[in-house]
């Protein structure tokens, strides 16, 4: 209170000047922080030997390939894929479900069908995927899992899965894979990248504050 | 100190208590207290009233925003969806960010009839498409339109093109070859404003005059309820940030090379 009253005693123009300096520093820090996003959002771990690889939905051009590569190197014995929710295009038979495409990639890579497992659940978000993995880990005690996702999704993925798995979180690792077209310098000048990063920040922020509702998800049928 | 002095100067002197009456704050009568408060309020500096006014205005603004959020959000969403009446002469259609579903194919078929051209812009193939594990862009759309009797449905193959501005030569060629025709851009809701900006920047005035915009509903949301669905919110965010990006960087720069799965596998321990 003493400090506050001291501030109040200052001339008004000094207060305004302090406010604007603070605001400008805040904006500059936000911009600088945003430009550092790919580094800050990437908390992926080096690939280590695990029992299974869980390839998250939403990146059929990279994630199943990375998961398949880890399997082929002998660093995992099983590949898991969540069943993603069918959108209208899929319901009307105009295209295949994304999970089916993952399985097809693995087939193409020569991975035997017995080594792949389809987790049914019609997932629509990372939270749903975390719930599916939680159930799988409960059914397979002692097994470890490597989660494959894009590098700048790893921070959010780690947060969501850690909260969902609770005491079992030590059994997971998060492996990152780079998306096509990424350039480390000036990535924000490439159409689509700035938006993608902003969207990731938005999701990270909203999920950070609302993760308590993880059990309220309506899509995952376990 | 200067500030402190000014405050002291602006503050009115407290009114004296009634003569002959009891003294001390505990014994102030209701009548004298009311009179003192009224005097104080009357003497309150203008800046304090300003501050109060601002707070009240902010509360009113929030209240109105809460009450009328639906029309406000609809108006904001509407900004991203340019919509023109169909041109008077002959015209063809270009599908951009087209939400593929049976209802929309029927709609386009009804608009185009049997004789109008419907064009789909095919950009760079993805890894899965190159491997033949997924149909190339536009194949489903053209198949569905042909099933509905649109024999003139076709693809502009952009090969390695990724962005709309890279298709400008295709637009120019078509508009030059069909000088009496216009083009109607059938676009997904929330993406039209971005396309309008790109085409307006790259096409000549003459060509631009022959471009018209027509939004089409997504199966998951429409103009009136986009903010209630996850898909609608995503589309809005995407459309708004694309316009923002366009305002800051224009066409932007080209992306880096594609990720190499073989190099990834080789680098594993």
Image: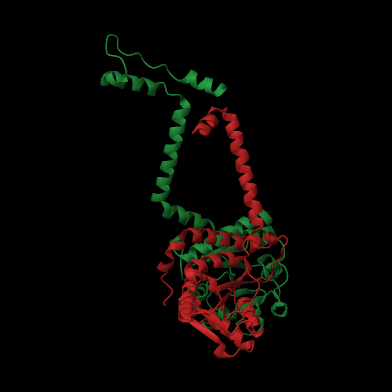
Question: Residue farthest to the top?
Answer: B20
Q: Position of residue B172 (x, y in %)?
A: 70, 67
**Does any portion of residue B161 appear in the rendered image?**
yes
Q: Which chain is green?
A: B
Q: Nearer the viewer, residue B59 or B91?
A: B59
Point 51% across, 72% down: residue:
B111
Q: Is residue B36 left or right of residue B53?
A: left
Question: Residue farthest to the front?
Answer: A142
Residue B246 versus residue B122 in the image, above or below? above
Q: Is residue A108 left or right of residue B262?
A: left
**Does any portion of residue B85 appear in the rendered image?**
no
Q: Position of residue B168 (x, y in %)?
A: 69, 66
- Quadrant that contains the C terminus of chain A: bottom left
Q: Is residue B78 left or right of residue A197?
A: left
Q: Position of residue B59 (x, y in %)?
A: 42, 42
Point 29% across, 21% down: residue:
B26
Q: Residue A69 appears in which quarter of the rendering?
A: bottom right
Residue A111 versus residue B245 in the image, above or below? below
Residue A74 versus residue A166 in the image, above or below? below
Q: Is residue B107 left or right of residue A199?
A: left
Point 48% across, 68% down: residue:
A166
> According to the rendering, which colour does chain A have?
red
Q: Position of residue A31 (x, y in %)?
A: 64, 52
Q: Nearer the viewer, residue B180 or B76?
A: B76
- Color encoding of the figure: by chain
Q: Nearer the viewer, residue B89 or A147?
A: A147
């Amino acid at each position: 209170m003493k400090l506050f009253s001291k501030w109040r005693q200052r001339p008004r123009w000094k207060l305004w000047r302090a406010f604007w300096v603070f605001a400008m520093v805040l904006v500059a820090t936000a911009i600088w922080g945003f430009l550092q996003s790919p580094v800050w959002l990437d908390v992926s771990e080096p690939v280590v030997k695990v029992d299974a690889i869980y390839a998250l939905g939403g990146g059929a051009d990279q994630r199943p390939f990375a998961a398949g590569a880890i399997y082929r190197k002998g660093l995992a014995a099983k590949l898991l894929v969540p069943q993603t929710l069918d959108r209208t295009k899929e319901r009307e038979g105009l295209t295949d479900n994304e999970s089916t495409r993952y399985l097809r990639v693995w087939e193409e890579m020569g991975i035997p069908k017995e080594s792949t497992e389809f987790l049914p659940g019609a997932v629509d978000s990372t939270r749903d995927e975390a719930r599916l993995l939680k159930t799988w880990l409960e059914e397979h005690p002692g097994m470890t899992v490597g989660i494959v996702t894009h590098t700048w999704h790893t921070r959010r993925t780690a947060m969501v899965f850690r909260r969902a798995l609770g005491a079992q979180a030590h059994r997971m690792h998060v492996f990152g894979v780079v998306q096509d077209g990424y350039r480390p310098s000036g990535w924000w000048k490439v159409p689509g990248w700035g938006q993608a990063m902003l969207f990731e920040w938005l999701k990270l922020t909203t999920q950070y504050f609302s993760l308590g509702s993880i059990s309220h998800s309506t899509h995952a049928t376990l | 100190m200067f500030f402190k002095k000014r405050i002291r100067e602006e503050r009115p002197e407290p009114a004296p208590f009634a003569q002959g009456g009891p003294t001390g704050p505990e014994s102030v009568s209701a009548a004298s207290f009311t009179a003192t408060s009224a005097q104080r309020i009357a003497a309150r500096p203008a800046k304090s009233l300003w501050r109060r006014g601002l707070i009240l205005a902010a509360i009113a603004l929030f209240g109105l925003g809460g009450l009328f959020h639906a029309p406000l959000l609809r108006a904001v969403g509407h900004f991203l969806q340019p919509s023109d009446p169909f041109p008077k002469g002959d015209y063809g259609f270009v599908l951009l960010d087209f939400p593929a579903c049976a209802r929309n194919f029927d709609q386009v078929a009804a608009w185009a009839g049997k004789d109008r051209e419907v064009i789909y812009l095919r950009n760079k193939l993805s890894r899965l498409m190159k491997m033949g594990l997924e149909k190339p862009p536009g194949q489903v759309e053209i198949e569905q339109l042909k099933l509905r009797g649109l024999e003139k449905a076709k693809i502009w193959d952009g090969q390695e093109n990724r962005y709309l501005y890279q298709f400008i030569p295709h637009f120019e060629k078509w508009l030059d070859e069909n000088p009496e025709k216009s083009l109607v851009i059938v676009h997904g809701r929330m993406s039209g404003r971005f396309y309008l900006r790109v085409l307006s920047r790259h096409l000549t005035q003459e060509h631009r005059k022959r471009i018209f915009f027509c939004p089409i509903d997504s199966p998951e949301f429409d103009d009136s309820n986009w903010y209630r669905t996850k898909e609608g919110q995503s589309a809005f965010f995407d459309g708004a940030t694309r316009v923002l990006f366009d305002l800051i960087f224009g066409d932007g720069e080209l992306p880096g090379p594609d990720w190499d799965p073989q190099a990834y596998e080789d680098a594993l321990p």
